[in-house]
Amino acid sequence: MVHAKSWTLKKHFVGLPTNSDFELKKVELPPLKDGEVLLEALYFTVDPYMRVMEKSLKEGDMMMGEQVARVVESKNSAFPTGTIVVAPSGWTTHSISDGEKLEKVLAEWPDTLPLSLALGTVGMPGLTAYFGLFDICGVKGGETVLVSAAAGAVGSVVGQIAKLKGCKVVGTAGSDEKVAWLKKHGFDVAINYKTVKSLEEALKVAAPEGYDCYFDNVGGEFSNVAITQMKKFGRIAICGAISVYNRTGPLPPGPSPEVIIFKELHLQGFMVYRWQREVRQKALRDLLKWVSEGKIQYHEHITEGFEHMPAAFIGLLKGENLGKAIVKA
């Protein structure tokens, strides 16, 4: 019999999650039925959306999330033993799947790239950057793009794709280390929003004529300031609002209606799961090609050990990660 270790929600979060909000449980998995596979996790992702989606769980439920896993036993001919997949199995070391929601890693995946990238630059965060920039912002060469949380899993890809397409890119981050990484990897201007005297002035200096596209990962007061810097007919892709996810009091007021109206701005929230099948596969292949060719650089913030899943998640929400936060099983 196979025993799985799983992290469950012990109690709902109040403000920033704590280690005591989670409980590690051990369960015995049943034998496989026809059509099923047994998965063993290799890498786990922790992402900001989990802070929001936790509200949909009941206390005692397993934490949600994707993992890169290996098929270690199979009764499904589509997924023979040894197949590497991305699976929505949650925070668990082993799981059983009927194969319906499994996605094989691209067949052309090179041995030189870590499989963990299927949870990052060549996975959900990379796809979020890709579709948010192209389909929501409709970015074109020669435009000026502003990216918040630009050293994170999504923002770092947004900025580099925009540079590939001939844009001027301004990124903001919360530490000098992150700012240095952005400058090293092609951002035209990188701003530490925590140390500037005036965010409004820093954004104006970076792009005096304003911004065509703002890729918003943080929300809150930051975005209220950023939106005032948009050009006429500017486009804003609202991807996340990590600055307010742990807030326990009232949310800050939204952006100025006058700015949105008189500049005729287009604001659109989006979730990446809208894009499926052929367009998703094309995007994954584009991302893999750019990474393989060195046109997109990546950085992974790897935590070793499944037992450290809560700590990795809490660290992510504190902004401790540079690039994609990954837990190695």
Image: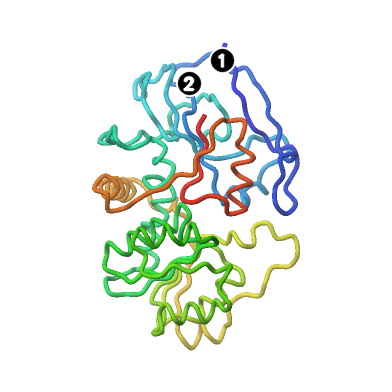
Q: CA distance from mark 1 to mark 2?
A: 9 Å
Amino acid type shown at disc 2: Leu
Estimate the x, y position of residue 147 in percent, counting from the top left. 45, 66
Check if mark 1's residue and mark 2's residue have beta carbons within 8 Å: yes
For the point 62% across and 29% down, which residue is it?
A: 6
Question: Badge 2: how crowded within 10 Å, few (<14), some, or many (20+)?
Answer: many
Return the residue nearer the eye: 309 or 271.
Answer: 309
Q: Which residue in the protein does label 2 denote?
A: 38
On the image, which quarter does residue 116 sit in?
top left
Quarter of the image for the N terminus: give it: top right
40 to 248, vertically: above or below: above
Estimate the x, y position of residue 225 in percent, counting from the top left. 55, 77
Horizontally, is 227 left or right of 233 in the view?
right
Structure colour scheme:
rainbow
For the point 60% across and 44% down, which residue is it?
A: 313
Amino acid type shown at disc 1: Val
Q: Which residue in the protein does label 1 denote?
A: 2
Hey, which residue is sitting farthest top in the picture? 1
Number of marks present in the image shown: 2
Query: Under tag 1, what secondary structure?
Result: strand
295 to 28, vertically: above or below: below
If you read the primary sequence from the N terminus, does the residue marked by circle 1 or circle 2 appear first? 1
Estimate the x, y position of residue 146 in percent, counting from the top left. 43, 70
